[in-house]
Image (cartoon, coloured by chain):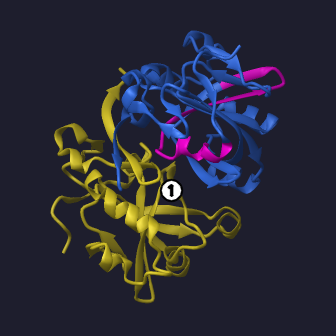
Chain colours: A yellow, B blue
Amino acid sequence: MSPEHFTPVPLDKAYRLLNHGPTVLVSARHEGEHNVMAAAWACALDFAPPKVTVVLDKATRTRVLVEGSGLLALQLPTAGQAAMTVALGTDSAMTMPDKLLRHQVALFEAPGFDLPLVEGCAAWLVCKLIPEPHNQQTYDLFIAEVVAAWADERVFRDGHWEFDSAPAELRTLHYVAGGQFFAIGESISVK
Amino acid sequence: MSPEHFTPVPLDKAYRLLNHGPTVLVSARHEGEHNVMAAAWACALDFAPPKVTVVLDKATRTRVLVEGSGLLALQLPTAGQAAMTVALGTDSAMTMPDKLLRHQVALFEAPGFDLPLVEGCAAWLVCKLIPEPHNQQTYDLFIAEVVAAWADERVFRDGHWEFDSAPAELRTLHYVAGGQFFAIGESISVK
């Protein structure tokens, strides 16, 4: 069952979920094994069809699962999930096979896909890998097409982020280094 | 002459300038012609040597200059530059050859490079293109190595963003769509 507030985002608005540069959690499943890692280097690449880039280091277990299944989810952790996000970016399933349990990461199934999503995020994008072996091998750079998207309707609805009317702990996280993030801040509109 | 507060950033800290997902201004010069455009899709790609990705649409004049010279600058506009950033992302030198004059974009020379930088930004990264014709042609995706970096010492010093102690108009901008940005917000540190 999907969590409360989990609401579809039209694909033509999906780029707006990543446009402001949030840190993401990457989840993947292959042959019954799943994992989740944090990644600061994810970015929109195209509008229609929506595409994304994400950097997945060769040392990560999640990368192996993405390469195996061709499917991944990018999801936007919230200010309230900062500690979990650091933990998922620091500990590897390579050396800590039970890292998701240890860090109490609650998962649910992506509707229509064999892919686990992380509860409590601000938004979720299911992506199909566009294989580019040279980029993957040389730069750890993965390109994928967004095939489904959802957001927590309290922070993103009708194609717009609405952080001002939502609790502060639902703001997206923007990682710097050494366990330090910024939450996204005030809206500025140019007329 | 470089502007006040323009301070070198060591290359091993340069990724921190982009890590939190700011919108950038891209500048380039080739055969005496220069231009500046806005780009929301720029991202760190590697730590050492620092590399970046940036998406440059085929309709832009700046892309032609980058392809000609192999050199580009990414610079981080501030909250106070929101209107200029929208203007530089909306108007093209293809149809408005005097767009930099019209939008009162003040430039200075990058020390040691034949490249104009935009005054008043929060940080500047000079990058050398790593030619990847397939990425450029298929995805409008450019990869470059950061070869020099500077920041306004009021907001970034000793390798750290220090927005809390600086004026609000110096915060970085994070574009969504339709002239709407978020400024970067509160710092969150996980111990």
Q: What residue is drawn where x is 62% and y is 40%?
A: B57
Instruction: Classify residue A189 by image quadrant.
Output: top left
Quadrant of the image for the N terminus of chain B? Answer: top right
Q: Is residue B20 left or right of residue B11?
A: left
- Report helix, strand or loop for mark 1: strand
Q: Is residue A31 above or below residue A122?
A: below
Q: Nearer the viewer, residue A162 or A82?
A: A82
Q: Nearer the viewer, residue A188 or B78?
A: B78
Residue B15 lies in magenta, yes or no?
yes
Q: Nearer the viewer, residue A44 or B61?
A: A44
> Is any atom of residue A73 visible in this view?
no
Q: Which residue is mark 1?
A: A51
Q: Chain of mark 1?
A: A
Q: Is residue B82 above or below residue B190?
A: above
Q: Is residue A69 left or right of residue B111?
A: left
Q: Is residue A63 left or right of residue B72?
A: left
Residue A56: where, in percent of width, then height?
A: 55, 66
Residue B189: where, in percent of width, then height?
A: 36, 49
Q: Residues within 10 Å of mark 1 (few under 14, many from 20)?
A: many
Residue A173 lies in magenta, yes or no?
no
Q: Is residue B11 left or right of residue B19?
A: right
Identify residue type, mark 1: Lys
Q: Is residue B92 above or below residue B44?
A: above
Residue B7: where, in percent of width, then height?
A: 62, 27
Instruction: Classify residue B190 by image quadrant.
Output: bottom left
Q: What residue is drawn where x is 45% and y is 32%?
A: B172
Q: Which residues are magenta?
A: B11-35
> Is any atom of residue B190 visible in this view?
yes
Residue B127: where, in percent of width, then height?
A: 71, 39
